Amino acid sequence: MAASPLLDTSRLCVHTITTQPWPVEEAIERYVQAGVAGMTVWRQALTGRDPARVGEQIRAAGLSIVSLCRGGFFPAPDPAGRQAAIADNRRAIEEAAALGAPLVVLVCGAVPGQPLEESRRQIKEGIMAVLPDAERYGVRLAVEPLHPMYADSRSAINTLAQANDICAELASPLVGVAVDVYHLWWDPHLEAEIRRCAQARRLFAFHVSDWKTPTEDLLNDRGLMGEGCIPIRQIRGWVEEAGFSGFNEVEIFSNKYWAMDQQEFLQAIKTAYLRHV
């Protein structure tokens, strides 16, 4: 069954990376003015700031803190590199707890030239190593599969099936998945794997943007919802049928949109969200 149009913005979350030119303080103010309900904070937005203080500012403004992005990047060609990644993820969990974010999104990483199977093994070991920290702070971890075009260096987890598999192996209620339509819309098994998420109660986050044709930059040319070829509303229907009732998170990396007036961009996000999500 197709999802119905969204008539309000009560489930609209925007990632701070989407409006990257704004410092987090301005993003808080502007999001509230636009009727945005939730914010996912990217770690670079916290640079030079006390995460606890930022969390207080977000909540005082009336926004929900949806998650912290990002942890991950566990694989490395040497033990020292893997230990450094584990230490950084422990810091991310601590930052999330201080901020008041219930979730850390994991972009799991890969090493160019290293077999993907080895990178996946290192990812699983890395998550296992930080699980005690997640348990201590009560912070969940969402494995986010990325499009196969990033399999060389950004993530060896490229399908929702692979993400579900690693979650099943770890068997922790604190480890689940983030479904990002930009990375997964092409997968013929997506609907079935979303149902698999429902059975295990591990669908933690839902991210939206669009795939432009032609794509001019493999990282920084995402489109506004409705600007490309992703069946966003259909996929939203699948996640809601799977029991997901959380925020629809707008995550757009775009040199084009970062260069424009961010207030105009935010209004365009709101319009696209209501029309196409």
Image (cartoon, helix red, strand yellow):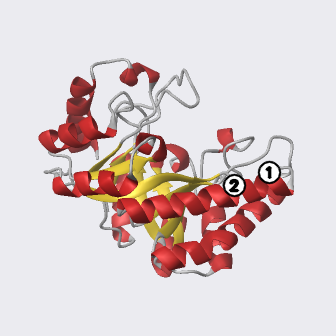
Q: Is residue 35 visible?
A: yes
Return the x and y of residue 43 as percentages of the image width and height. 47, 47
Which quadrant of the view contains residue 188?
A: bottom right
The residue shown at (20%, 35%) is 271
Return the x and y of residue 151 as percentages of the image width and height. 71, 44
On screen, residue 146 versus residue 84, left or right, reads left
Return the x and y of residue 206 as percentages of the image width and height. 40, 56
Mark 1 or 2: in front is: 2
Mark positioned earlier in the residue sequence (1 or 2) = 1
Q: Which residue is mark 2?
A: 85
**Secondary element type, mark 1:** loop
Q: Is residue 44 above or below residue 265?
A: below
The residue shown at (44%, 55%) is 68
* Residue nearer the viewer, 257 or 140: 140
Mark 2: give few (<14), some (14-19) or many (20+) Cα within 10 Å.
many
The N terminus sits in image quarter:
bottom left
- Amino acid carrying label 1: it is Ala
Marks 1,2: beta carbons within 8 A: yes
Q: Which residue is mark 1?
A: 76
